[in-house]
Image (tube, rainbow, N blue to C red):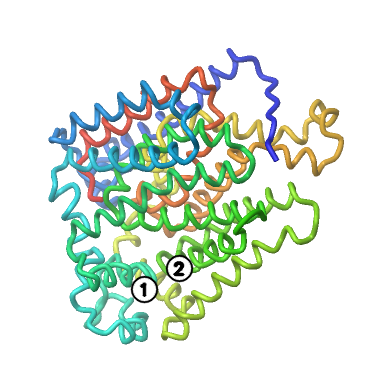
Amino acid sequence: MPTTSVTTARPGLASRADLACAGAAVALVALAIAVPLIRGEQWSKHLYAGAAPLFGQWMTHIGWGTAPAIAIAALVIAYGPSLSRRLPWRRLLALTWLTAVCWAFALAMIDGWQRGFAGRLTTRDEYLHEVGGVTDIAAMLRGFSARILDFQPGSWTTHVAGHPPGALLTFVLLDRVGLGGGAWAAWLCTLVGCGAAAAVAVALRALGSEERARAATPYLALAPAAIWIAVSGDALFAGVMAWAVALLAVAMRQERRWLAAAFGSGVLFGFGVYLSYGLVLMAIPAAAVIALGLLRRAELPAIRPALVAAVGALLVAGMFTTAGFWWFDGYHLVVQRYYQGIATERPYSYWVWADLAAAACALGPAAAAALHRLARELLRPFSTEYAGLQPTRRARLASVEPAAVLAAAGLAAILAADLSGLSKAETERIWLPFDMWVLAGTALLPARGARFWLVIQAATALLLNHLVLTNW
């Protein structure tokens, strides 16, 4: 059912609050940049991030992707808000996905074809480095855990060791079907990763908030996160999990083909946790979707989609377990491997808050600007003023904007990952699966200011991409 938002703050005050939240995010990033400079080279070398809080090197540069990126940004700023309101739904989704791909590819091309796109997944620490050595997939799965720890013969490279075998298996299968090499892998990550922009919109609409879904599409297509979507394996993970959540939202409506949507969601969730251990935190957005679905449907069968999704996830888990990989063994070994490397030197006292600054770079100031609106929307059902409009607590909770709930769920996943201490640095890419849901909160920004915030988002991405030569 559609939701109705009640806003009590005056427009002027809300606008100042938007700017204050965005300014706080910018200040956090500035502080994260300043601290290594103040502390000096001796301390900063232990950060293992030359452009801290981002993983890369400070290097002012331009490339042939500069002009196309500026042109794409200009088109989205000029026409995105109006097109998002009037295009037929399916055309809007296709355009959002296509725009996100073009934006990400253009940003990557600022660093050049090889350095910025085709070669990113071929370095010694990346997945493709191990693809050629996998001659027997069954044997790889059975012996995967034995090769996780470092400093032993046959140890996996950094990224392969740091993830379950689903990630490596994906690139092996891509190679087996004749699409081997860095360019094809890069296109897979970019296309699937950019699909998350459409998936978030699908989820919002399925939860009864088409107006907000439409409002969010320009922000999702033009997100600074595109810098790391093209190209990193985490973009692939983000796309898979975004569609898992979106299909679950579709299934919770229990309309036509809900059974297939629920099972498909479960299969994607199941495969997702075998792509990255940290994706278990996507249970938070999934729980948010289930809670919203249950609040809108009072009858007991409303839980059926969640149960069907659980069956699909368990089926995938059973297949990997039968093949010889036990997820919990892999996880405990990865924690040991994590502290065999530079994580022991990276100071938690810096990264516990600088990680959030890195995430702010990927999300952009517009996502930060919406945070106070998100908080107000979540607290609205508990206000005495609103209680008179919606007499029952269930009705009040059911009326909360799905955009606020999903954005809060993404933020909760980020905070959980941050406090774990297992995400010290490189979170601008590692947290992409969570970032896409935080970006849903941009739908709460006023329509009259959409072009202003899109300019800020585009400028952030262009500035970062031209000042920092990123590693991912």
Q: Sequence-wise, which precedes: disc 2 or disc 1? A: 1
Mark 2–mark 1 distance (CA, rounded to whole Å) = 10 Å
> Compared to 75, does 106 lie above or below?
below
In the image, 284 versus 205, the foreground residue is 205
Mark 2 or mark 1, which is nearer to you? Answer: 2
Q: Which mark is residue 423?
A: none
Residue type pointed to by label 1: Pro
Residue under the point 56% across and 30% down: 444
Q: Quick one: SS at disc 1?
A: helix
Residue 363 in the image: x percent, y percent?
41, 38
Q: Quick one: SS at disc 2?
A: helix
Residue type pointed to by label 2: Phe
In the image, 195 versus 389, the foreground residue is 195
Q: Which mark is residue 165?
A: 1
> Compared to 7, does 174 lie above or below?
below
Q: Are marks 2 and 1 in contact (CB under 8 Å)?
A: no
Graded by Cα atoms within 10 Å as few (under 14), some (14 to 19) or many (20 or more), the crowding at tag 1 reads many
Viewport quadrant of the N terminus: top right
Residue 57 in the image: x percent, y percent?
20, 43
